[in-house]
Amino acid sequence: MNLARRLLRTKPTERIVAESGRGEGGELRRTMSLWQLTLFSVGATLGTGIFVVLGQAVPKAGPAVVLAFVLAAITALFSALSYAELAGTIPVSGSSYSYAYATLGELVAWVCGWCLMLEYAVSVAAVAVGWGEYLNAFLRSLLGVTLPDAITRSPGQGGVVNVAAILIVLLATWLLLYGASESATANAVLVLIKIVVLLFFCAVAFTAFRSRNLAPFAPMGVAGIAGAASQVFFSYIGFDAASTAGEEARNPRRDLPLAIILSLAVVTAVYVLVALAAVGAMPWTAFDAERTEAGLARIADLAAGASWPGLAVSFGAVIAIASVVLTVIYGQTRILFAMSRDGLVPRVFQRIGGRRQVPVANTLLVAAFISVLAGLVPLGRLAEATSIGTLFAFTLVNIGVLVLRRRSPGLPRGFRTPLFPLTPVLGAVLCVVVMAGLSGVTWVAFGLWMLAGLVCYFVYGFRHSRLHVEAGSQAKPGTTSPQG
């Protein structure tokens, strides 16, 4: 087989689905309901972004930041609909990695999986780092004390080791080892708490709502709205988390598409309501792009004329980060589980063990890696590059819908993207447009990450690919195909 054919060979969709749930030493348990899947996506999406993004976006768009959230939601919706179709057609843990393997070939699938590692592992480490800062803000408001910099900052930021970041990663890991269903239940509680906190903020802010604060509504015009939409778009990243639970969902063909779409609807409604309450309670000119870490808490305090509402909002930010860490680590382990089953990463990542039938070694290795990043490494620009990696994966998913519809029109689909092929085409184009607006430094970081990924693929995955090994075995009489 020549090199090009080998790199572009696809894994049959029927085989991907048939292998669903199977790992080395056991099978994943199908325990997650539609409710749990939806809140998993909400948990991964509704994070600290809304607690800080307003302070950055309002100076660009003014009160029209509300429209910026709507525009960003529409942009995300095109990709979400494509995800929903592929999740209902190929309901497995690999998410967009598995979708790319079925439609665009092994090399593209590897690149997609490598992008997902950037999105999940690096971004969750960055989020965990922020947990210590929000915890300090909460403790300062509640007790007037803070944790020392030595244990809340990395060495490059004036600390020794970020123990707070490591602690939240370890807590999430303990929950994941306890069981997927139990983790989903814990996440549901955390998500409901942070939604209640955000609704509480809206209730407080609306008591100080003044219609004059909405005028002029769009002081920067359409350009300002578009610029703010590009900035807040990244607050929607995470709705794909439900697709990583494809092998532990009770009814994946029906529930995965619904969970993806429902989660995006819930997050959009919360974002728009919070944005409207915030700009109605405080003049848009009072928003400070340099002081974003406690923006909602400050508005709540000003609206109520007291400090306790801000304390509640700070608590919501702490809970928000905890749920993001939990759901994103889960997603990372399940993607590696699928990649390991295909032979592209070591077999240890597909081993299932313990009474709860979870990938124990996989979870521990991912947690160890993230803990080192969060505790010791200043992530800097690499954390910013997670956005471009996610958008690249979204682009591949949109293209995958087009390819699979043409190649296998008769496949059973739990959901069909409406207005095909316009929806996936627009989804891909919009992702590319948003990517083009990112900084040159982000592109450089992304390029270096991709180069490292290609080296890893050709050093390990290229030789250990299960499709390649089986093809070699079939070419030799008297041999049998390995089972992973």
Image: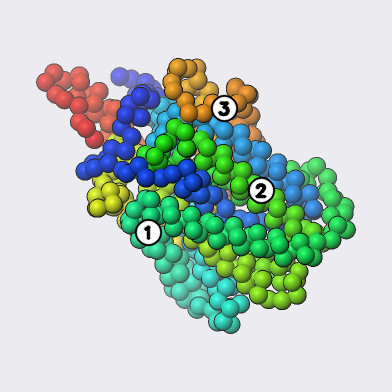
Q: Residue furthest bottom?
A: 144
Where is residue 417? Give x, y as percent. 57, 27
Mark 1, other Cα within 10 Å: few <14 / some 14–19 / many ≥20: some
Q: Nearer the viewer, residue 175 or 397?
A: 175
Q: Which residue: 44% across, 64% down? A: 168
Q: Quadrant of the C terminus?
A: top left
> Mark 3: which secondary structure?
loop
Q: Which residue: 32% across, 44% down? A: 29
Mark 2, other Cα within 10 Å: few <14 / some 14–19 / many ≥20: some
Q: Which residue is mark 3?
A: 417
Q: Earlier in the sequence, mark 3 or mark 2?
A: 2
Q: Which residue: 30% across, 46% down? A: 349
Question: What type is the residue that disc 3 sits on?
Answer: Thr
Q: Are marks 3 and 2 in contact (CB under 8 Å)?
A: no
Mark 3, other Cα within 10 Å: few <14 / some 14–19 / many ≥20: many
Q: Quadrant of the N terminus?
A: top left
> Mark 1: which secondary structure?
helix
Where is residue 406? Give x, y as percent. 50, 17
Q: Nearer the viewer, residue 132 or 2?
A: 132
The quadrant holding residue 92 is top left
Q: Which residue: 37% across, 48% down? A: 333
> Of the numbered discs in the image, which one, if any, rests on residue 269?
2
Q: Earlier in the sequence, mark 1 or mark 3?
A: 1
Colour theme:
rainbow
Q: Is 191 situated left or right of 292 in this image?
A: left
> Could you tell me if residue 460 is visible in this image?
no
Q: Which residue is mark 1?
A: 175
> Could you tell me if residue 219 is visible in this image?
yes
Where is residue 203? Give x, y as percent. 71, 62
